[in-house]
């Protein structure tokens, strides 16, 4: 039960304080009564006010008596897309037949997973191997986990695999050649820089080093970011891969600190690298109170210094993302403790209170009460722009319109800068039957809250886009995603037959298949068959729509990323799925979330150490927009494309070279900035309203294998010139 001391053993050390008064701003609710009043008025306001009049000169609110006209009843059904004699005749036989087969496949799938579990634990985990594995699972800190992981790798002989260079999933010859060239050029540049007396004079070896870096600093260069390279051991990867990443970072830092290059040249160089390398985003899924496992994942990334700047959350994950994006690192270190449970009060009402509300309104929770509780996590009525300016983190929250035909929206400091964060979090958590659709609120210049987006109402983003990878790639060039997935209805289907980063296969020294090749074959076949018949139900429109909602997307969307973290839940989590956690239960969720993240940290850190240097190089030119701390890659790319288009205009070849530095400078002229803003607004409008009937999260349902989940990793990022050439063709 909620609040039971049995959630954590009495001898287990705590992950932090249990005293709520140690939390920063524990007594401060950050909310104003006027904001809640404005929100209440927006919820009760009609969408459109009816206008009645006898004629153009009559009073507008005069009562009008309409003559009753008998109309012939049409023979059309309520849903014009579902009509016809054959459809009516076959609807129920097909519905019950397909659903019955899905139930049968689901039972077979569960039996298969049970067989694989028994196979691994009966034939693999025994003796010294079981002892070392138990130490790995019971680690209370990352240092303990690292020690246990190294011991397990040494016992299984994985260290020998790390020393060998050849592997089928990357080009080791190219990686070795590039690593040697980088090391050689780096030594030459250091030697030449010591002999150089004039700091402005160019260096030939430095130009070669920059050219080589531009060639190899790319997303998944020759397969070096393939998750399979981290799935053969419990910690680390090939020594050649680690040497390559370290050498790239060292060379980039030398270019960043080199005094022979001006800041303008550095910004141009690192901008080109950023477009090819991309950005990393942390995606937090929905899942009701399962979302509190995200706190442990955040804590593990924060302690390791690997927390990405781009964070997105949906439903329950939006609440966690809002807390992270509105607090600094110092504040988060004090907040991510078991005492945080005292501020989680969303489910504080008794049964009689919420049941009467549900019977009367169809919602278990009260919107105003949730706004009050949520405002503390969002630090009051902060907007997306204000949170971005305060912490430098880019918060994204997915919302789905109550209109089933409109596309989803990804709220952030670009698409909706003045939108209040707590209203977006509430809208993203508005599951039908749990919370009624929410009106997004906007903060005006004088600090008042008014309805946003014409007062339209929005609901849970997980219904259609739990992980918005497509929108993140469009807005922020994200091509490496860290997904913390806790949705209880799809957690069962997360299965990697060849292992995942930091979690190799238990037998054949990590080179085999989970449950043997037969077990993995049955699991994959049944899962793909389940996916096929779920798609049949959706495309033939056989599924009923309770509460006016199409529920098929809760299965048929992409739930995974380049790195997918799924904390291990327990049965009591299902019982407490709509209950506030006790400090003891939150303590357990924190440590479980950290343990689930530790196996992925080496993979993430190798990615982040290169990206972090690139971002530092971009900031050499100062802030891109007034009052912002982090350059906006979207505006930067727009400026770069505008420059390249201008270079190809006839009659501009003579004078364009004189203005190159002006256009590449971070501070653009007013005319150029105005043009970029118009182009950006046009592009954002096309993103939000031209959906082309494609799901935001890509069509990659219950298939969640690590090898298939990183389909974006091999994506080639085209240069602006190449994209313009394609448009001209």
Image: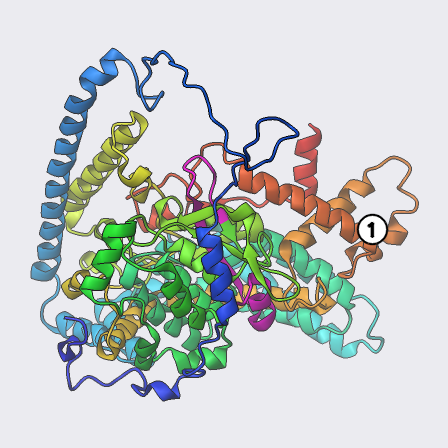
577 or 8, nearer to the observer? 577
> Left or right: 596 with respect to 402?
left
Crowding near the residue tagged with mark 1, few <14, some 14–19, many ≥20 C-alpha atoms within 10 Å: few
The x, y position of residue 5, in whole percent, is 15, 80
Percent x, y of residue 454: 55, 46
- Residue 517 vs residue 218: left or right? left
Nearer to me, 319 or 124: 319
Going 91% across and 37% down the picture, which residue do you hit? 651
Q: Quadrant of residue 3?
A: bottom left
Q: Is residue 597 magenta?
A: no
> Is residue 496 something that shows in the picture?
no
| Residue 233, x across and y down, in percent | 30, 64
**Where's the C terminus, which quadrant?**
top right
Tag 1 residue = 671
- Numbered disc total: 1
Can residue 461 be seen here? yes
Of residue 195 and residue 441, the one placed in the foreground of this image is 441
Whole-percent x and y of residue 367?
Answer: 38, 59
Determine the residue positioned at 87% across, 53% down: 659
What residue lies at 29% left-to-right and 25% top-to-bottom?
540
Quadrant of the snapshot with the N terminus: bottom left
| Element class at badge 1 | helix
Query: What kind of colouring is applied to the model shown?
Result: rainbow
Range covered by the magenta-colored residues: 381-409
Residue appearing at x 81%, y 66% in the figure: 202
Residue 392 vertical placement versus 686 (above, below)? below
Where is residue 630, by image quadrant?
A: bottom right
Out of 102 and 659, give the one closest to the viewer: 102
């Amino acid at each position: 039960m909620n609040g039971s001391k049995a959630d954590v053993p009495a001898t287990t050390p705590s992950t932090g304080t249990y005293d709520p008064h140690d939390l920063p701003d524990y007594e401060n609710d950050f909310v104003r009564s006027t904001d809640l009043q404005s929100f209440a008025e927006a919820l009760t306001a009609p969408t459109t006010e009816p206008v009645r009049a006898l004629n153009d000169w009559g009073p507008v609110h005069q009562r009008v008596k309409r003559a009753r006209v008998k109309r012939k009843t049409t023979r059309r059904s309520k849903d014009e897309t579902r009509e016809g004699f054959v459809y009516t005749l076959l609807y129920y036989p097909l519905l019950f037949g397909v659903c019955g087969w899905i139930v049968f496949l689901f039972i077979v799938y569960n039996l298969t997973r049970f067989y694989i579990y028994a196979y691994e634990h009966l034939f693999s985990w025994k003796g010294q191997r079981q002892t070392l594995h138990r130490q790995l699972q019971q680690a209370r800190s990352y240092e303990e986990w690292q020690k246990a992981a190294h011991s397990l790798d040494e016992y299984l002989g994985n260290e020998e695999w790390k020393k060998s260079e050849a592997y089928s999933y990357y080009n080791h010859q190219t990686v070795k050649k590039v690593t040697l060239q980088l090391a050689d050029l780096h030594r030459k540049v250091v030697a030449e820089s010591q002999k150089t007396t004039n700091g402005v004079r160019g260096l030939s070896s430095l130009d070669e080093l920059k050219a080589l870096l531009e060639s190899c600093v790319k997303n998944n260069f020759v397969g070096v970011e393939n998750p399979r390279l981290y799935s053969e051991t419990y910690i680390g990867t090939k020594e050649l891969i680690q040497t390559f990443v370290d050498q790239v970072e060292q060379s980039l830092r030398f270019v960043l600190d080199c005094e022979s290059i001006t800041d303008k040249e550095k910004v141009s160089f690192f901008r080109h690298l950023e477009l090819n390398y991309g950005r990393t985003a942390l995606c937090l899924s929905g899942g009701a109170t399962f979302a509190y496992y995200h706190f442990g994942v955040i804590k593990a990334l924060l302690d390791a210094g690997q927390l990405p700047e781009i964070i997105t959350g949906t439903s329950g994950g939006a609440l966690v993302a809002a807390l992270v994006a509105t607090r600094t690192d110092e504040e988060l270190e004090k907040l991510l403790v078991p005492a945080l449970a005292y501020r989680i009060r969303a489910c504080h009402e008794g049964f009689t209170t919420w049941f009467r509300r549900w019977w009367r309104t169809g919602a278990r929770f009260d919107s105003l009460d949730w706004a009050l509780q949520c405002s503390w996590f969002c630090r009051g009525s902060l907007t997306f722009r204000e949170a971005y300016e305060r912490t430098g983190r880019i918060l994204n929250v997915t919302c789905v319109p109550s209109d089933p035909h409109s596309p989803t929206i990804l709220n952030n400091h670009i698409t909706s800068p003045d939108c209040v964060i707590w209203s977006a979090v509430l809208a993203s958590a508005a599951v039908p039957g749990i919370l009624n659709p929410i009106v997004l609120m906007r903060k005006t210049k004088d600090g008042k809250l008014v309805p946003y987006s014409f007062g339209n109402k929005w609901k849970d983003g997980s219904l259609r886009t739990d992980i918005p990878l497509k929108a993140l790639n469009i807005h922020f060039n994200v091509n490496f995603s860290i997904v913390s997935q806790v949705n209880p209805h799809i957690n069962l289907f997360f299965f990697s037959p060849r292992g995942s980063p930091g979690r190799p296969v238990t037998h054949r020294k990590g080179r085999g298949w989970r449950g043997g090749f037969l077990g993995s074959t049955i699991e994959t076949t049944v899962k793909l068959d389940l996916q096929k018949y779920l798609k049949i139900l959706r495309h033939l429109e056989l599924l009923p729509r309770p509460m006016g909602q199409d529920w098929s997307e809760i299965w048929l969307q992409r739930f995974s990323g380049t790195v997918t973290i799924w904390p291990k839940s327990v049965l009591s989590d299902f019982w407490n799925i709509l209950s506030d956690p006790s400090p003891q239960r939150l303590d357990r969720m924190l440590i479980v979330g950290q343990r689930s993240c530790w196996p992925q940290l080496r993979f993430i850190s190798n990615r982040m150490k290169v990206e972090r240097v690139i971002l530092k190089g971009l900031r050499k030119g100062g802030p891109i927009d007034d009052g912002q701390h982090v350059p906006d890659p979207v505006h930067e790319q727009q400026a770069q494309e505008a420059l390249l288009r201008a270079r190809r205009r006839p009659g501009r070849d003579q004078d364009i070279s004189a203005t190159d530095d002006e256009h590449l400078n971070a501070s653009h002229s007013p005319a150029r900035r105005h043009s970029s803003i118009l182009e950006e607004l046009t592009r954002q409008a096309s993103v939000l309203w031209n959906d082309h009937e494609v799901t935001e999260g890509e069509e990659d349902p219950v298939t969640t294998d690590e090898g298939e989940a990183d389909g974006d990793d091999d994506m080639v990022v085209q240069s602006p010139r190449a994209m313009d050439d394609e448009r001209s063709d």
